Amino acid sequence: MERPIKNHSEALEVKIRTILQQVVDVDEKNQLVQIVLWVQLTWKDYKMKWDPKEYGGIIDVQLPPGTLWKPDILLFNSADEHFDALFPVNFVVDYEGNVLMSPPSIVKISCNIDLTHFPFDDQICYLKYGSWTYTGHKVDIVVDTEGLNPPHSMDLHYYVPNGEWSLLSTPSHVDRQEFFGKKYVEVYFYLHLKRRTLYYGLNWIIPSLLISLSNVLGFALPPECGEKITVQITNLLSVLVFLGMVSNVTPPTSESIPVIVAFFTASLLILGLSVITTTLTITIHFRNPKTRPPMGPLLSLIFLEWLPWFLMMERPGKKFARPPQLQGCRCETFEDIREKSHRGSSITSKNIDSKSSTEESERLKASSEDLIEETNWTENPRYVIPQYSLDECTPMEISLREIADNLKFIRKKFEEEEAEEEEESDWKFMAMALDRFFLFLFTGAYIFISLAMVIATPRIFDQSVITVKK
């Protein structure tokens, strides 16, 4: 059929109006959008005019498809299997020659969905209409916006809101371009959609933040707690589950990385490092001086002095300090033993010969004095025992030597145990300092990546609509 126009050198004006009913689905993985709409086309047919008075007051008629000429306007970016999803409908013709065709359709359109700011993203998709065979010199397509308010160029009187997406604006744009001396007309209807983030906030973001918080608080647990590393491994597996949920939604593309994927990946990296550092602190906490070399002076300076000072930590008192001397108990020194020995010798001399007893007493006294003079004293002279020959010892001196040897052994044992406990205390305090350091470090890391996610999402609180130059 030929175009219904008197002068074939002129272009027939066809008005297009889209009545949007529903945004059914936005398939991010396959880059498709499914919508329900009516495409209303109107034009004039100069041969279809009559006077209603001559035809019983009839002002319009319905004619079946195929009886009149119709423009071959199609949806260029259709992703439907049948491409043209318009349902064939009757023509509605009024007595002035105005022809109306308004077929309903469920269309799938291809859309370049950018998930960089997911789930705080907004998408701009469009429906591209144009004549399949007629150039702009024969069919001129214009947008019918009568009765519509900006920023909408689509009729939304029958629109059903979508639970996942908010429709911000529907501007339109008519593109007239010259190709090889011929003018082609293309009409664009844009859909500015913004994702509703309540679902993702309650099911993804808040749980992930709580997981991050529990991971940070895990450093506050003492290293001897068996659940310390278990908590962090559980958090690590939880973030892996969230990352898998995001991968099921997002397309497998390398052009852009969603913000939430970057957040979960960073959280996964921090959790992995926290497991490693926790293992390190537990190893340090339970380090045994009997099987490990002692702490070097450099490590002691860094982790026992500088790092605690930087973290404003105060080292607690020594848990295994040497006990104080008991009140009311007086330990005997060698001077006391010598005096007792001297008194014992004086009493004994009364029952023996005066000459021999005097010689024995003098020899014992000299021996005791030599015993004390030959002693190498340390800071506590009570437990230091002198060395002397057994040939010159009396039975009492032999007993004193045995007692002194036992005291020396006990003192050495106490010193060794005290040194081991001091070494263990140093390692444990080093583990506490590292725990505090990693607590601050990973807390700062989580705050940084959270702020980075907000800054990297400029439209998180922006509700402005797009404007298209017509």
Image (spheres, rainbow, N blue to C red):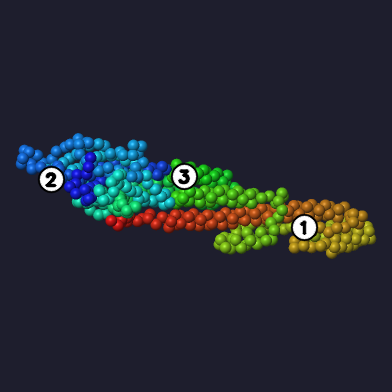
Mark 2: few/some/many CA within 10 Å (<14, 14-19, 20+): some
Mark 1: few/some/many CA within 10 Å (<14, 14-19, 20+): many
Which marked residue is nearer to the observer: mark 1 or mark 2? 2
**Image position, residue 313 (x, y; %):** 57, 60
Q: Please, is residue 375 above or below residue 402 in the view?
A: below
Q: Is residue 420 visible?
A: yes
Amino acid tagged 3: Pro
Q: Earlier in the sequence, mark 3 or mark 2?
A: 2
Q: Which residue is mark 1?
A: 383
**Image position, residue 260 (x, y; %):** 45, 50
Label pair 3/2, CB-CB below 8 angstroms: no
Q: Residue at x 48, y 57 (%)?
A: 448
Report the side of 386 relative to 268 (left or right): right
Q: Earlier in the sequence, mark 1 or mark 2?
A: 2
**Image position, residue 374 (x, y; %):** 85, 63
Report the side of 171 relative to 265 (left or right): left
Q: Residue at x 30, y 56 (%)?
A: 468
Q: Which residue is mark 3?
A: 252
In-front residue for pair 219/152? 152
**Image position, residue 385 (x, y; %):** 81, 58
Amino acid tagged 1: Tyr
Q: Which residue is mark 2?
A: 96
In-front residue for pair 335/431? 431
Amino acid tagged 2: Glu
- The quadrant of the rendering that contains the N terminus is top left
Q: Residue at x 43, y 51 (%)?
A: 116
In-front residue for pair 425/148? 148
Give the structural element (helix, strand or loop) at label 1.
helix
Give the structural element (helix, strand or loop) at label 2.
strand
Q: Earlier in the sequence, mark 3 or mark 1?
A: 3
